[in-house]
Each structure stands twice: as C-alpha cells, then as structure tokens.
Image: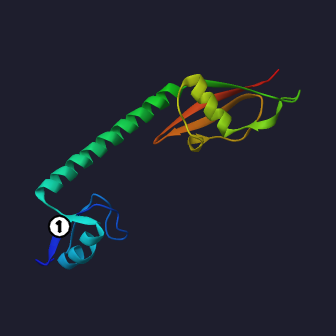
Amino acid sequence: MSSSSLYVVFTQDVPQVASKNTLKRVRRGYFSNYLMPQGFAKMATPNLLEKLKVKIEGQKNEALMAQATLSEQAKKLLGKVIKLQAKASPKGTLFRAVSEKSLVEAIKAQIEVDVEKSQLKFEPIKKIGNHSVIVKFGEHEVKVTVEVEAKG
C-alpha cells in the first residue's frame, strides 16, 4: 500500500473488514471518513498498541485459567456415580425418562460441579439400572455413571 494508508486498531467488530482489537492497515480516507467518525477504529499509536498487547495477554491468561477450571471440574467428575431415584413399573421401566435438568441438579448436589444441559450427551434413560453419560468440558469429555433406582 502507498503512503495514503495507515495502521488502525479496531475498537469494534466491522463485518468483512476486521474484528475488535485487530491491528490492520487501511486507507487514510476510509479511516477518516468512516471508521473514526463511527467509532469503529482508532489510529495505532505506540501507547494504544502497548495497551492492546496487555489486553490480549490478559485475555490469553483468562482463557488459560478458564481451561484449567474446566479441567479441574472434569477431574472431579472422573469415575463418579450419580444416583437418581425415579418412579418405575415393576418391570423396571421408568414412568418418565430422566431429564437433563434432573441430571444437572444431581451433579451439582452430589459432586458440587456446575454443568449445563448443553454439556450433557446421553441416550434417553428410561429404565432403572446403570447408564453412561458423557459430560463435555471444552475439549475434555468425562464419562460418568448414572445409577437409577426405583423410588419406593
């Protein structure tokens, strides 16, 4: 590019141009007539670049901490058995399948790990007995056993 361009740091996502906190070279006119007046970008000064670098490092550290927390939660669940009680027929068929909500609540109550419905992967549980449930924590998947007993 010629001298009619400059480096800017985007303060917001601009579709098909750049995402927030991205350093990019753009035409001077595009910056002064559109990006700057709309508040989409600021001129890349040494001070702003240093702030951006610190911010990106902080985000990386937060991501690593979040990953470590997910890993810790996965370790807490490893090899655990979740016990549930449900009404069942004499043949062992449940009157109502075990819901994701009841599993989430049981995991929180019995193992003290917060999970969301979207993290659970399992076939509908419709009989008493032991069943496998996969709980996803980012890249980690943990297999837990759900032991369903007939409610007296």
Give the quarter of the image for residue 45.
Answer: bottom left
The residue that appears at 63% across and 28% down in the rendered structure is: 106
The residue that appears at 26% across and 71% down in the rendered structure is: 37
**Residue that numbered label 1 is attached to:** 7
Give the side of residue 31 with respect to residue 110, left or right.
Answer: left
Q: In the rendered image, is residue 80 in sight?
A: no
The residue that appears at 32% across and 70% down in the rendered structure is: 17
x, y percent for residue 13:
35, 63
Question: Dividing the image into 4 quarters, which one contains the N terminus?
Answer: bottom left
The residue that appears at 60% across and 23% down in the rendered structure is: 110
x, y percent for residue 96:
79, 37
Which is nearer the eye, 67 or 142?
67
Q: In the rendered image, is residue 63 in sight?
A: yes
Q: Is residue 76 above or below residue 38?
A: above
Q: Residues within 10 Å of mark 1 (few under 14, many from 20)?
A: some
Look at the numbered disc 1 and give the secondary structure of its residue. strand
Question: Dividing the image into 4 quarters, which one contains the C terminus?
Answer: top right
x, y percent for residue 66:
39, 38
